[in-house]
Amino acid sequence: MEYYPKLTMIDKTVFKDKKAKYFTLGCKLNFSETATIERQLQEAGIRTARAGEIADICVINSCAVTQEAEKKCRQVIHKLIRQNPGAFVVVTGCYAQLSAERLSKEEGVDVVLGIDKKGEVLEHLGRLEKHTECGEWFAQPTKDVRNFVHSCSRGDRTRYFLKVQDGCDYFCTYCTIPFARGRSRNPFISELVEKARMAADEGGKEIVITGVNIGDFGKSTGESFTSLVKELDGVDGILRYRISSIEPNLLTDEIIDYVAKSRSFMPHFHIPLQAGSDEVLKLMHRRYETALFAAKIAKVREVMPDAFIGVDVIVGTRGESEELFEQAYEFIKGLDISQLHVFSYSERPGTKALKIEGAVSPAEKHRRSKLLIALSEEKRIAFYERFVGKEAVVLFEKPRSGMPIGGFTDNYIRVEMPHDKCFVNRLVQVRLGGFNEDKSALTVTEVIGFADMAESKTSFS
């Protein structure tokens, strides 16, 4: 039931002097979409609340990838309501899609918007009148979701995040994403190229290409991810692109070879492995084996020896015995990669994984996770050490107040130096020094000059 009809014509006088707070859980795609929501509200006259201010509107973009993410979402809702009494509260995102009615009954929540309504937050603010009982919820069955909600925003970041695809048709046994975001869909390449041009016109220099399964791009339009990459490469003003995450079976040799010689695509790949044994990959219903994954890593290293390669791994899935984990550990240890992103398996209602025998205890998941995180740090530090004393071009980002200015090289090495605002959103050629105090970044020993007008893909020398 709709208690307060949304405004069909936006009455901006309702939003005069109103302030909003935003909270995002989950993936880079969610952060991109939140930034787009924030921009839409700002254009309607709603200012983003400063630290310590009480907001009139709170927007939570939720995640449902784990039980912990759902729990944290509820905690965030309650915290924001306490800190912002009387605020109009909107919840959207994956958890909102999967549990819309339940979330609408959380005390203080006014509107819950499913995945197809994520681009309509402004329209559902109505007159900001709090609901006296439970909130409204709008979430059609995921199987019926067909629309694509555009997003190309930077929020408070320097890099832009361009959403090129949504949904997934893979239905891996452990994953709820197809139930939360729907089937794979995308806009036309021409629309995305226009978004990139708009980012360039606003002064953007780097774009991260995001989506749920971006290598599957083209199902809606009869185009291909390779064609998208080539068209984006021709957009003037954008000096750097990064491919956020791409399935190994969809990362073709053609894409790898093109990135190696392209004008603006960086030597940086994020490739989900999820399990390092063929038996567990089969239980997960992944669409490749370890041999294919290893071949992709070898191909990247053949044409881009200095590329950063990040890899996702899930530990403790049902059916992953200690022997299979040891097998996976040795396989991953032997890969020439730069960093791991380690996740502990979380039981998700409605997934086929619940039918698999051999549950792993929380303590054992924690032990395995610690081992892989330690291995990840060994690999990352060894990768960084190769470039100490070398020259590199860094895109510096806007720092937090009182913090050093930081940024990334073309191959995604984190770099820090004392704050100088003239470096923000500039490509700067530097000489890399040793590690900072916590070894999370390399320092700068020499600033050589600005490189904004030069080729941004710089060889180390």
Image (spheres, grey):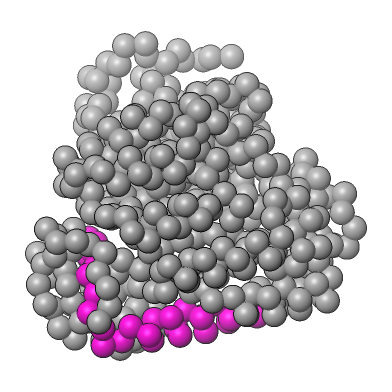
Residue 47 in percent (x, y) is at 24, 37
In this orientation, which residue lies closer to the viewer: 379 or 263? 263
Q: Is residue 372 magenta?
A: yes
Residue 161 in percent (x, y) is at 36, 47
Looking at the rendering, the stretch of residues picked out in magenta corresponds to 371-398
In this orientation, which residue lies closer to the viewer: 230 or 403? 230
Residue at 37 percent of width and 14 percent of height: 7
Image label count: 0
In this orientation, which residue lies closer to the viewer: 82 or 428? 428
Residue 243 in percent (x, y) is at 42, 53
Residue 242 location, quadrant:
bottom left
Residue at 30 percent of width and 35 percent of height: 193
| Left or right of 328 in this view: 443 | left
Q: Is residue 264 magenta?
A: no
Q: Quadrant of the C terminus?
A: bottom left
Residue 423 visible? The answer is no
| Left or right of 331 in this view: 181 | left
Residue at 54 percent of width and 76 percent of height: 336
Residue 442 in percent (x, y) is at 31, 81
Residue at 39 percent of width and 81 percent of height: 384
Q: Please tell me whether residue 336 is drawn above or below residue 195 in the rendered image.
A: below
In this orientation, which residue lies closer to the viewer: 77 or 133? 77
